[in-house]
């Protein structure tokens, strides 16, 4: 099987090279590397073009949002499995993709594989600030305030073909809506691996302000509503408690 690894970037000259090197360092060889740039105006494009010979698909142009860029990458990707590595992130080891692809081979009935994620300092990826340790998927996974760490999620291409891409009408949490759709509404089979797959630098858009957190929560409620499922009353308190545990 082939995997497509998609990196989306906009004006991130400080860490995009780390993401590129992390993809290229993966020991699994049958991989396609797709880079989607949002018409960067800093030095990002010069850095990306240093690696042209290793990038299989590249596009640049203004995006409506990160999720619009994800969709552009999905349209370019030709792999049997799709994974995303954002320009602020790196894989936690050169064998992550090999581990994932071996598991897909061993479990042909599994549609999605996800692991754990570490939040690290922006200036030092060895300095861990939060640990997002997930759990195996179960019937009330989302009702109990769980959600897989999206950067650690690898999905067979057929899932996107059947369930659709990211809904860009969700401005702050289209990744949450997508995961809610494929895990909770469509109930594709998922396998959890108790291992860190990705390190993510702190500073994401969703958590930058109380306003963005509020908008993200509204998006989450609308995701449930979109699929005709009523969220439990304690959904957000449970989500909050799980986030607090990530610091310990």
Image (cartoon, rainbow, N blue to C red):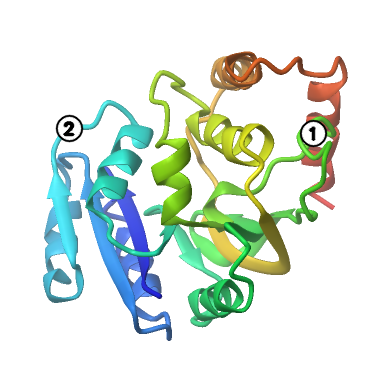
Q: Residue at 57%, 18% (x, y): give it.
A: 219
Q: Residue at 64%, 31% (x, y): give it.
A: 185
In the displayed structure, does residue 113 sit left or right of residue 138? left
Asked which secondary structure carries label 2, the reply is: loop
Mark 1 Cα shell of 10 Å, populated few (<14), some (14-19), many (≥20): some
The correct choice, above or below, for 192 with respect to 23 in the image is above
From the image, which quarter does the N terminus lie in? bottom left
The foreground one among 205 and 60 is 60
- Residue at label 2? 62
In the displayed structure, does residue 32 sit left or right of residue 142? left
Mark 2 Cα shell of 10 Å, populated few (<14), some (14-19), many (≥20): few
- Image coords of residue 80 (percent x, y): 39, 64
Label 2 and label 1: CA atoms lie apart by: 34 Å
* Badge 2 or badge 1: first in the primary sequence: 2
- Image coords of residue 218 (percent x, y): 61, 14
Indicate the quadrant where residue 224 lies.
Answer: top right
The correct choice, above or below, for 115 with respect to 235 in the image is below
- Image coords of residue 148 (percent x, y): 66, 47
State the mark number for residue 13.
none
* Residue 15 appears in view: no
The correct choice, above or below, for 60 with respect to 177 in the image is below
- Residue at label 1? 145
């Amino acid at each position: 099987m082939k995997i497509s690894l998609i990196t989306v970037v906009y004006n991130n000259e400080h860490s995009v090279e780390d993401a590129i090197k992390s993809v290229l360092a993966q020991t699994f060889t049958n991989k396609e590397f797709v880079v989607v740039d949002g018409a960067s105006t800093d030095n990002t494009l010069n850095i990306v073009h240093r690696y042209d010979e290793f990038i299989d698909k590249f596009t640049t142009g203004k995006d409506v949002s990160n999720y619009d860029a994800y969709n552009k990458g999905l349209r370019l990707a030709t792999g049997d499995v799709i994974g995303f590595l954002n320009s602020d992130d790196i894989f936690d080891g050169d064998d992550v993709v090999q581990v994932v692809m071996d598991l897909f081979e061993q479990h042909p009935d599994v549609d999605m594989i996800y692991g754990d994620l570490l939040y690290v300092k922006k200036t030092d990826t060895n300095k861990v600030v939060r640990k997002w340790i997930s759990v195996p998927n179960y019937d009330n996974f989302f009702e109990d305030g769980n959600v897989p760490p999206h950067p650690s999620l690898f999905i067979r291409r057929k899932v996107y073909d059947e369930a659709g891409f990211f809904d860009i009408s969700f401005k702050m949490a289209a990744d949450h809506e997508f995961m809610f759709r494929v895990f909770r509404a469509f109930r594709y089979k998922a396998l959890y691996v108790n291992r860190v797959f990705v390190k993510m630098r702190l500073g994401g858009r969703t958590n930058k302000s109380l306003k963005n957190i509020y908008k993200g929560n509204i998006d989450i409620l609308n995701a449930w509503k979109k699929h005709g499922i009523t969220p439990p009353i304690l959904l957000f308190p449970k989500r909050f408690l799980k986030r607090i545990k990530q610091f310990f």
